[in-house]
Image (cartoon, rainbow, N blue to C red):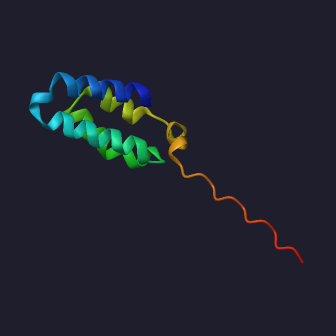
Amino acid sequence: MKTAAKVFTVISSVMFFWTIIEPIFAAIAWKKMKTITRRADLTKWAVLTLIFMNFWGGLFMLLTKDKDYACNAPAPAPEAPAAAQ
């Protein structure tokens, strides 16, 4: 779903680049999709995309699962070696 949302936002921003708001919303939505770790963090931008950009792109953003954004989570810190006694 995440890929479909990206595809539809790109298609919409290319088709309506002259409206200026489309490329701005697309850039913000893509940035959010790259940095968030939970779907709940994207809900506001998904609704705005649904209203101002593209129905399908916003709908696919709303239908994504948390596991789609698991790759954005920071890697766990490596454990420090035990101190030798």
User: In the picture provided, is 14 more to the left or to the right than 40?
Assistant: left
Place residue 49 in its image quadrant.
top left
Residue 8 percent across, percent down from the top left: 31, 24
> Relative to residue 78, is residue 38 depicted above or below?
above
Q: Is residue 20 left or right of residue 12?
A: left
Q: Quadrant of the N terminus?
A: top left
Q: Quadrant of the C terminus?
A: bottom right
- For the image, the number of numbered tags is 0
Q: Nearer the viewer, residue 46 or 2?
A: 2
- Direction from residue 85 to residue 40 in the image, left or right: left
Residue occupying image coordinates x 23% and y 39%: 25
Quadrant in the picture for residue 77: bottom right
Residue furthest bottom in the image: 85
Query: How far across and down, in percent of the image, does residue 23 sit?
Result: 20, 35
Nearer-the-camera pick, 33 or 67? 33
Residue at the (54%, 41%) spot, across then down: 71
Q: In the rendered image of this protein, does residue 4 appear above or below residue 76?
A: above
Outermost left residue: 18
What is the residue that sits farthest to the front in this orientation? 84
Looking at this view, is 38 or 26 the one in front?
26
The image shows residue 5 at horizontal and vertical percentages of 36, 29
Q: Which residue corresponds to the image point at 9% horizontal and 29% vertical from the top-left? A: 18
Q: Residue at x 18, y 21 (%)?
A: 15
